[in-house]
Image: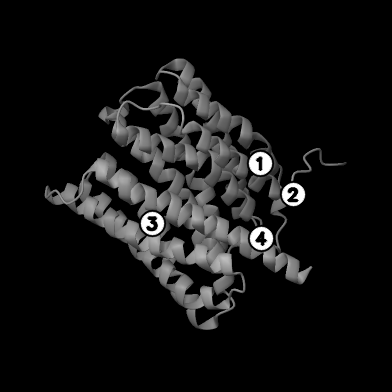
Amino acid sequence: MTNPFRLKPRWGQHSAILGGLLCFLLLLVRIGDSPETTLMQRIVLLGILVIVPLALSLVPASDSRDEESLFYRLALLAQPLAAIGAVVSFLLEPGVPAAVLAFLWFCETALIAMFGLQRLCKPELRSTAEVSITAGLIFVPVAGVWLVVHRLGIQLLGYGDTIILLTAVHFHFAAYAAPILAGLAGRRLSQFAGVRGVFKLTPIGIIAGTPLVAAGISFSPALALAGTVMISIGLVLLAVLVAGWILPSLESIPGRVLLLLSSVSCLSAMILACAFAYSIVFNKLIIDIPQMAMTHGILNAFGFSLCGLVAWCLVNRETSTATG
């Protein structure tokens, strides 16, 4: 029987390009009730419109049948509609109508997670790199849940709206984009026998640190600090491996430049994240939330995630052309 969903991964890249144009147009529209809230909401929209579809387009491994997964095809097909629903929800006042539109995005993240769970059942996708990518897919519905809560305008579990919005940001970038970027690098690093074992520490730090940060928000700032340190160690190690082994092996000059920017942004963003977590635990103000949004948020979203994903699109396209 013919599969009615004939979408290719490139569909996600086309959606990301259109999403980027929409992000640019949304700069003309006023959202948020303060400069820091506006910035965080725009970062979330970047994640929804650009980062999620772009990363999703890079997930299928060359030796897997990911493209044939019904959940993968549905996620690609539904992403533009769900993203538009999320955008419109930000143009409305918080409440039930805005939350209903944001719920469309939660449904999209649920499809992505189902695709991730499906990957767990495939023996050929159990390498460290592929498990890292799968973890990002499975984590992302948490971002969808907190987006709905944010647009509903309630203080769930007593959290303020800023913490709720920061959690949505965290799970779109640190929990989704970061492990996928680590996995994409891991695929390339598999050809370097000397660093395969070292690379395994990168996903461990990112994957284990993500729930610790979430638990720390709920129960203990010390847990959040521990989780932040673990994620930072994983990402700093990733940046070193990318700069030391992957960059010299690439022929694509734009790919090299963007991956270098991604690595430098990652290092800077992680230093700021640790400083912020330290501030909360020990009540010593080093950097506050508005400053984090202006520095860590921009570095992580545009520098690390966006530059990194675009770089891998260019590298993969060049590799496909060379082998084709």
At x 62% / y 55%, what residue is drawn?
58
Q: Would you name the residue on which mark 3 appears? A: 208
Whether residue 67 sits left or right of residue 25 in the image: it is: right
Q: Kindly identify which residue carries mark 4.
A: 61
The label nearer to you, 1 versus 3, is 1
| Total numbered badges shown on the rendered structure | 4
Tell me whether the residue at label 1 lies in contact with that at label 3, contact meaning CB atoms closer than 8 angstroms. Answer: no
Q: Determine whether 239 is above or below 221 in the image.
A: below
Kind of residue indicated by mark 2? Glu
Please name whichever residue, 142 or 19, is drawn nearer the observer in this view of the structure.
19
| Residue contact at pointers 4 and 3, CB within 8 angstroms | no
Q: CA distance from mark 4 to mark 3?
A: 24 Å
Does 207 sit left or right of 7 as displayed?
left
For label 1, the residue is 76
Q: Earlier in the sequence, mark 4 or mark 3?
A: 4
> Reading the chain from its start, which is encountered first: label 1 or label 3?
1
Residue 15 placement: quadrant: top right
Mark 3, Cα crowd under 10 Å, few <14 / some 14-19 / many 20+, is some
| Earlier sequence position, callout 2 versus callout 4 | 4
* Res. 68 mark: 2
In the figure, 152 relative to 118: above or below?
Answer: above
Q: Identify residue type, mark 3.
A: Ala
Dot 1: element: helix
In terms of depth relative to the viewer, which is nearer, 264 or 190?
264
Q: Residues within 10 Å of mark 1 (few under 14, many from 20)?
A: many
Inter-mark Cα distance, 1 to 2: 12 Å
Disc 1 versus disc 2: nearer the observer: 1
Counting residues from the start of the chain, the first of labels 1 and 2 encountered is 2
Measure the C-alpha gap from mark 1 to mark 4.
16 Å
